[in-house]
Image: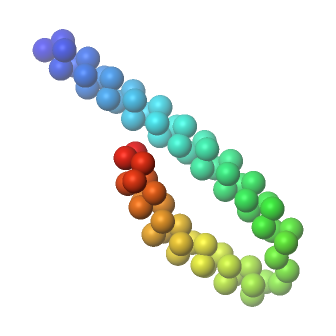
Amino acid sequence: MAKLFGELLFELLGALVRGAVRSFLEQTIIVKFGTWLDTRVQGRTVRIVLGLLLGVGAYFLIPIALGLLSL
């Protein structure tokens, strides 16, 4: 019984650490990329279209990348 609880606790802590690290890395990369892109793109319409394209791309590519990395 102790072994079962130990394994469950280990999995829970591992999932929490992986989630925290992944969210931290994603947020910093996204913020840096967004700041860099914001200075390069001129015009409201272009920003909206580019944002939609990036959003659709992320919607499909992030699950594929996470699946390939087994996260």
Give the residue at the far front of this rendering. 68
The C terminus lies in quadrant: top left
Q: Is residue 24 left or right of residue 47?
A: left
- State the image coordinates of residue 66 (x, y, percent, origin top left): 43, 53
Q: Is residue 25 left or right of residue 46?
A: left
- Looking at the image, which residue is at 67% across and 51% down? 29
Foreground of the two, 64 or 48:
64
Q: Is residue 23 left or right of residue 51?
A: left
Give the residue at the far bottom of this rendering. 45
- State the image coordinates of residue 49 (x, y, percent, origin top left): 67, 84
- Looking at the image, which residue is at 85% across and 72% down? 40
The N terminus lies in quadrant: top left
Q: Quadrant location of residue 14?
A: top left
- Looking at the image, which residue is at 81% across and 62% down? 36
How many numbered tags mark residues here?
A: 0
Give the residue at the far top of this rendering. 2
- Looking at the image, which residue is at 86% across and 68% down? 39
The scheme the figure's colours follow is rainbow
